[in-house]
Amino acid sequence: MDAQECGAAAAPEPPARGCVAAWGHMVRRNLRSLPHSCSTLGRKIAALYDSFTSKSLKEHIFPPLMEMLIYFNFFKAPFLVDLKNPESKIPHTVNFYIRAEPGVMLGVWHVVPSCRGEDAKGKDRGWYEAALRDGNPIIVYLHGSAQHRAASHRLRLAKVLSDGGFHVLCVDYRGFGDSTGKPTEEGLTVDAICIYEWTKARSGTTPVCLWGHSLGTGVATNAARVLEERGFPVDAIVLEAPFTNMWTASINYPLLKIYQKLPGFLRILMDALRKDKIVFPNDENVKFLSSPLLILHGEDDSTVPLECGKKLYGIAYNAYRNKERVKMVIFPPGFKHNLLCKNPTLLITVRDFLSKQWA
C-alpha cells in the first residue's frame, strides 16, 4: 500500500536546487504524519533513507561488489543441469539434501567408489549412506568460487577419486547451485562442518578427509580449526591451489589486477573485505591444526600463484610439531588452476599420503 492509499498527501518532489539534507528532512516529516495504520511502513522508509545517506557511495558499492567477485555464486554454470539427477553426468551417484541450519538446505552428490558401481545400480539414498561404512576412504569436497557441483572440472576430479577407490561427497555451499541461503564466510564454514559431521556420524571407523580447492581451501581450514578447537581434529586435509588469506588472494585476482594502480584502490579493497568480514585466513588457521595436511599446487597456476602455496606450506611446516604430517607436492606446467586432476600422478600422490598417515 502506498502513501496515497493510506490517505496521506504525496511527498513533495525534491527541489531542483538546494540541499539534499533539507529535502530528506521534509520527507521524514511527511512520513511522520502518516496515519497510524502506515506508521510502521513510514518508519521503515525513514530508516532506510537514513541508512543510505549516512554512508558514502563507495561504502554502498564496494562491499557487495567484492562479495560478488569472491563467491561468484550467481554464475550457476553449467546451465540447464538437473542437479537432482546426477547420474546424467556421473555414474553411481545419488543426490540428497541436508539442513545446515534453519533456512539453509545444502545440495550434495555422493559418488561411491567405481568398484561398487554395479552394486549401486537402482539403489536409494539409504544404501548410499550405509555404503559409507564399507571401509573405502571418504573425501568431502569443498569447491572453489562460481558454478556448482556439476562443473566439468569438479566432475573430472570426482571420477578420478572414485576410480581410485574413494567415496566423494560434493557439496554446494549456501547460495551455490540449488542450495538455499546467502554465502558468507561464517556460513560456508558452518556448511563444511555440517557435511563433515554428517559424514563422520555415518562412516564408522572409515576415515574422512576434507579436500578444499581454491576458495574451498579457506573453507576447509576454517572448518578444521573449529573442529580442532572442539577437540575433534579432522582425519586429514587436502588443500588444492591454496592461498594464504583472502587479502593476498584478492590482489592477485586477475579481474582486479588491472585496477590496482588506481589511487586508493587497495585501501578501498581492504575496507570492503573488512566490511564483509571476508578473511579466510589459511595462514593463521594452519598454525592451530594437527591433522595430516597435504598441499597440492601447479607451477602454472595464474589464479592463485604457486608462491602462495609455498608460503602456506612453510607456515604450516614451522607450526606443526610432527613434521611428517605436512607435505607439499608441486605439479609441472600444463594443469593451471582447475585441472590437476588430469595429472596421472595426482591419485597416487593422494593415496600414498593418506595411506601413510592413516596406517
Image (spheres, rainbow, N blue to C red):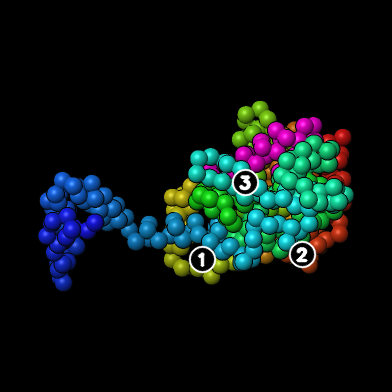
Circle on res. 260 = 1
| Residue 128 lies in quadrant | top right
Q: x, y (%) of residue 314?
A: 72, 46
Q: Is residue 235 left or right of residue 183?
A: right
Q: Is residue 135 left or right of residue 281?
A: right
The residue closer to the viewer here, 41 or 265, is 41
Circle on res. 97 = 3
How many numbered marks, from 0 up? 3
Q: Nearer the viewer, mark 1 or mark 2?
A: 2
Q: Which of the marked residues, 1 or 2, is nearer the chain's N terminus?
A: 1
Image quadrant for the N terminus? Answer: bottom left
Contact (CB < 8 A) between labels 2 and 3? no
Describe the element under mark 1 as helix, strand or loop: loop
Residue displayed at 50% across by 51% down? 182
First to last magenta residue range? 186-211
Residue at the limit of the structure toward the top, as seen here: 231
Q: Which of the marked residues, 2 or 3, is nearer the chain's N terminus?
A: 3
Q: Nearer the viewer, mark 2 or mark 3?
A: 3
Residue displayed at 87% across by 35% down? 359
Residue linked to disc 2: 335
| Residue 30 lies in quadrant | bottom left
In 3D space, how far apart are the residues under numbered discs 3 and 1 (Cα atoms)? Answer: 41 Å
Graded by Cα atoms within 10 Å as few (under 14), some (14 to 19) or many (20 or more), the crowding at tag 1 reads few
The residue closer to the viewer here, 161 or 263, is 161
Describe the element under mark 3 as helix, strand or loop: strand
Graded by Cα atoms within 10 Å as few (under 14), some (14 to 19) or many (20 or more), the crowding at tag 3 reads some
The residue closer to the viewer here, 165 or 231, is 165
Circle on res. 65 = none
Q: x, y (%) of residue 281?
A: 59, 45
Q: Which of the marked residues, 3 or 1, is nearer the chain's N terminus?
A: 3
Which amino acid does the dot numbered 1 rest on?
A: Gln
Q: x, y (%) of residue 201?
A: 70, 33
